[in-house]
Image (spheres, helix red, strand yellow):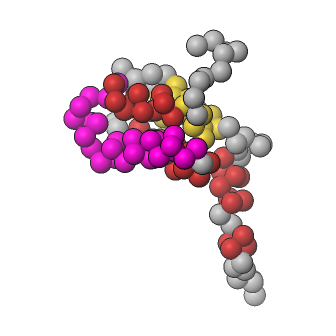
Amino acid sequence: MSITERPRGLPLAEIVRTSGKGLRATVNTVQEGIRLIDRELPSELRALSRWTFARALLVEAERSGKKRDLICATRQLRQALSTKAGWRLKTASFFQTGSQGFRNFVRKTTSPTRFGLRPPRGP
């Protein structure tokens, strides 16, 4: 795929880059994530709960198309990749709004004040 070519299908919340032997270098879409699990993983890894859960979340994200489902599926895919020894995980966020990127997005959407809670006041 060239740089100017856009991936087909529903994009993940982040581009997931791996350096694992035998795995694709990047996972851009939900369909690529499902394909990675179904075709590129050894069967003994594919049977582990972290991978079956990641696949189920990817399928649900593809079905619903909701942003929160895409974020959860991407997070679980990253978690499953990070637990395999020897596979380093790199990500580039679609939510980059500055140097903090995705962390700022999560911090803003999960802050206590968003839910009506006030942080404790100092002395």
Left or right for 59, reference 91: left
Quadrant containing the N terminus is top right
Q: Which residues are magenta?
A: 40-65
Q: Residue at x 40, y 23 (%)?
A: 23
Quadrant containing the C terminus is bottom right
Q: Can I make out residue 28 in this image?
A: yes
**In this picture, is 107 found above or below 41?**
below
Residue at the extreme bottom of the image, as rendered: 123
Left or right for 79, reference 67: left
Q: Can I make out residue 91 in this image?
A: no
**Residue 102 coordinates in the image, percent (x, y):** 66, 46
Q: Residue at x 30, y 48 (%)?
A: 49
Out of 115 and 64, give the one closest to the viewer: 64
**In this picture, is 53 found above or below 114?**
above
> Is residue 42 rendered magenta in the image?
yes
Name the quadrant containing residue 54: top left
Out of 65 and 117, give the one closest to the viewer: 65
**In this picture, is 63 found above or below 26?**
below
Out of 93 and 28, give the one closest to the viewer: 28
Left or right for 118, reference 86: right
Q: Residue at x 48, y 30 (%)?
A: 31
